[in-house]
Amino acid sequence: MQIHAVRALTAVATGVLASACMTSRIEQERHAATGVADGESLVILARSYHTGNSTEEDFVDCLAKNLSRGRAGFHVYDDDQFLDDFYPWFEPRTEPVSTAQLPDILQTAAVSTALAEAGIRYIVWLEGATDILDGGGGISCAVGAGAIGCFGLTWYENGASYEASVWDLKALRSAGQVSADISGMSMIPAVVVPVPLIAPTQTTACKRLANQLTVFLNGPSATLASP
């Protein structure tokens, strides 16, 4: 019986691994034309006022790295340096919640001058998180004959959902939003030794959001939507 169970578990694990257990949805909504000229840069900031929990710092870093990569890459202003340089205007308790507040901030001479010197054209406000949506199963381990053996199957579903809102500091308006929603199932089958089979939902969301943002920022390629 145990041999048949081992074979069945191995077959299930192999089947799940062989199939790409991730689904994705990438969406874009454009409000205005975009384009990045020579000398212009952007900054990615994690939005935190909605829930009190800011977007993961590693995701912000991943997105910045992917957007600045290659010959067609953008100049991405370091987010921590930006917050220091423009303190306290973009701290969680004072950050603008809409483009309607941008003129008030830019009327401050020090802020306006610093933004112009840094060449910052766009602020990309990032919201989202990677969470465990569901899970189940179990693994049991036992000691025998001087060795430890484990048997069972644990699984969980991850969801990575992120939205990037692009603000144009030159036009003082929202240029639009780009979002990525990735879900995937990870497994830990154990036949003597547990073997994690992890679905890279967050990494995939980062790469696909970066690709879509690159297209978005380089210019309008879709019908403009109402703001």
Image (cartoon, grey):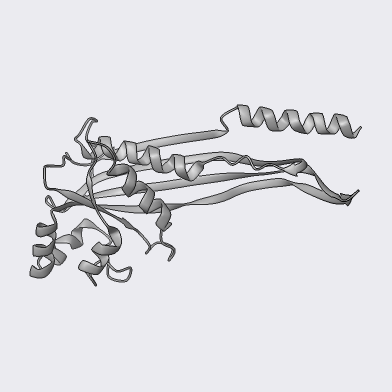
Task: Work out whether 133 lies above or below 22.
Answer: below
Residue at the (67%, 27%) spot, across then down: 15
The quarter of the rendered structure image containing the C terminus is top left
User: Percent x, y for residue 205?
Assistant: 43, 42
- Picture residue at 59% right of the left edge, 41% below the top: 198
Residue 108 shows up from this direction: no
Query: Residue 152 appears in which quarter of the rendering?
Result: top right
> Where does the image place residue 34, in percent across and percent down from the top left?
17, 40
Residue shown at the point (84%, 49%) measured from the top left: 147
Marks counted in the figure total: 0
Identified at 27% across, 70% down, the residue is 94
Could you say which is closer to the camera, residue 131 or residue 20?
20
Query: Residue 169 placed where, x, y %?
Result: 15, 53
Report x, y in % for residue 73. 24, 40
**Image position of 190 with respect to 113: above or below:** above
In the image shown, does 27 or 155 lie closer to the viewer? 155
Q: Is residue 78 left or right of residue 51?
A: left
Image quadrant holding the N terminus, namely: top right
